[in-house]
Image (cartoon, grey):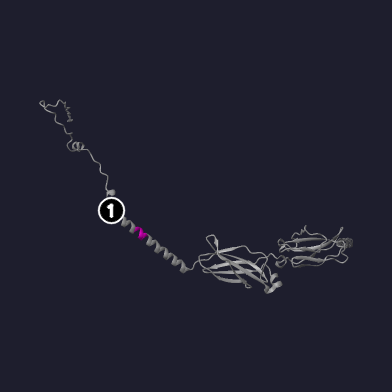
C-alpha cells in the first residue's frame, strides 16, 4: 500500500516538473480588445519572442480553437475584421521549444468590428407599422451612450418604382409609422455616430399595409355598383340595336324556305305527273309527241 502511494506521489511530481518545464516562458501581458484591435504587451524578458494567436466561436470548454494564420508572430496587436464578431481570442509566447500559457481576451463585440447593423423587426396593422430596433449587443451603448442613434429609412414601392425616401433619426428602439393602407413599403436601418453613418446598412424588409375594414367594405360596394352599371349599359345597347335593326333581325330569324317545282307538287297532290296534249293530225306542226303512260299497280 505504501509502495502505491510513493509511486503516485512520484508520478504527480514528474507531471508538475513537466508542466513547469513546458510553460517556462512568461505569458503575454494585458491582453485586451481596444477598438478594432486585439492588443497585448511583451512579457518580462520577452526579447526575441514570437506570439501565437488562436480563436474560437463558442465558449464551451470542448469547443475547438483555430490558428490565426494571418498574424505576424512578432506583432503585438491584431486587426479585428467583421468575420470575427462573437469570437474569443487567446495569445501565448513561443521561443524555440518553450511556450507560455495562453492568455484569453473578451468576446468580440460590435464596438470592435465597426460593421454591426441594428436588428429590425416589423409588425403591420391597418394604416400602421410598428418598427422595433435592437442592438446586437450592448457594447455600442456602453461605449458611445446617446451619441449612437438609429437612422430608419422607408419608402413606398409602387409598380416597381420607388417614391421619395423618408428618414427618421431616433434613440428610441420603437417607432409607430402611420402609412397608407393597401401600399407596399420597404424599410432599412443603420447606425449614426455623431450624425455620421456607422457600420453597415441592414437588409431591406418590405411589408404590405393591410386595409381597414371600412376600406374593404367601400371597395366591395364600389365593385358591385360598377358591375351593375356595366351590365345595365350592355343590356341597353342590346335593346337599342334590336329596335334599330329589327327587320333584319326578324328576317334572319325566319326559317329557311325550300321552293319545290310545281310539277313535283302536282305529283305529290294527285299521284300523277301532268300530261302534255299531243297535237292533232291536222296540225301543221310536224313535231312528234311522246306519250308517257303511267301504269298503276293493282
Horizontal side, residue 265 vs residue 162: left or right: left
Q: Residue at x 54, y 61 (%)?
A: 161
Horizontal side, residue 37 vs residue 272: left or right: right
* Residue at numbered disc 1: 246
Residue farthest front in this picture? 284
Kindly indicate the quadrant of the structure image that contains residue 46: bottom right
Q: Nearer the viewer, residue 280 or 298?
A: 280
> Which corner quadrant holds the N terminus?
bottom right
Q: Nearer the viewer, residue 243 or 222?
A: 243
> Which corner quadrant holds the C terminus?
top left
Horizontal side, residue 32 vs residue 183: left or right: right
Q: Position of residue 143 (x, y in %)?
A: 71, 72
Q: Position of residue 199 (x, y in %)?
A: 68, 65
Kindly indicate the quadrant of the structure image that contains residue 177: bottom right
Decide whether the magenta segment is chiefly helix, strand or loop.
Answer: helix
Magenta region includes residue 272: no
Q: Residue at x 28, y 50 (%)?
A: 248
Crowd around label 1: few <14 · some 14–19 · many ≥20 (10 Å): few
Magenta highlight range: 231-235
Give SS at disc 1. helix
Q: Nearer the viewer, residue 184 or 93?
A: 184
**Number of marks in picture:** 1
Q: Residue at x 39, y 64 (%)?
A: 225
Amino acid at each position: 500500500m505504501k509502495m502505491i502511494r510513493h509511486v503516485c506521489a512520484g508520478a504527480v511530481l514528474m507531471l508538475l516538473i513537466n508542466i513547469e518545464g513546458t510553460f517556462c516562458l512568461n505569458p503575454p501581458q494585458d491582453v485586451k480588445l481596444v477598438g478594432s484591435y486585439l492588443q497585448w504587451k511583451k512579457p518580462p524578458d520577452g526579447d526575441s519572442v514570437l506570439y501565437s494567436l488562436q480563436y474560437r466561436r463558442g465558449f464551451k470548454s470542448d469547443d475547438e480553437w483555430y490558428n490565426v494564420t494571418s498574424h505576424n508572430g512578432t506583432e503585438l496587436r491584431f486587426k479585428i475584421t467583421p468575420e470575427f464578431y462573437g469570437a474569443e481570442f487567446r495569445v501565448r509566447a513561443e521561443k524555440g521549444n518553450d511556450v507560455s500559457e495562453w492568455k484569453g481576451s473578451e468576446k468580440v463585440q460590435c464596438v470592435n468590428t465597426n460593421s454591426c447593423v441594428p436588428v429590425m423587426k416589423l409588425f403591420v396593422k391597418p394604416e400602421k407599422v410598428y418598427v422595433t430596433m435592437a442592438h446586437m449587443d450592448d457594447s455600442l451603448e456602453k461605449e458611445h451612450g446617446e451619441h449612437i442613434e438609429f437612422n430608419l429609412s422607408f419608402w413606398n414601392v409602387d409598380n416597381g418604382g420607388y417614391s421619395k425616401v423618408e428618414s427618421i433619426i431616433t434613440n428610441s428602439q420603437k417607432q409607430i409609422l402611420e402609412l397608407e393602407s393597401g401600399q407596399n413599403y420597404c424599410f432599412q436601418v443603420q447606425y449614426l455616430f455623431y450624425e455620421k453613418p456607422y457600420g453597415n446598412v441592414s437588409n431591406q424588409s418590405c411589408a404590405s399595409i393591410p386595409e381597414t375594414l371600412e376600406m374593404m367594405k367601400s371597395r366591395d360596394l364600389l365593385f358591385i355598383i360598377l358591375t351593375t352599371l356595366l351590365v345595365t349599359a350592355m343590356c341597353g345597347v342590346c335593346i337599342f340595336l334590336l329596335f334599330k335593326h329589327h327587320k333584319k333581325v326578324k328576317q334572319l330569324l325566319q326559317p329557311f324556305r325550300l321552293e319545290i317545282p310545281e310539277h313535283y307538287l302536282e305529283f305529290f297532290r294527285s299521284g300523277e305527273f301532268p300530261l302534255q296534249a299531243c297535237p292533232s293530225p291536222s296540225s301543221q306542226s310536224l313535231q312528234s309527241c311522246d306519250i308517257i303512260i303511267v301504269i298503276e299497280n293493282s
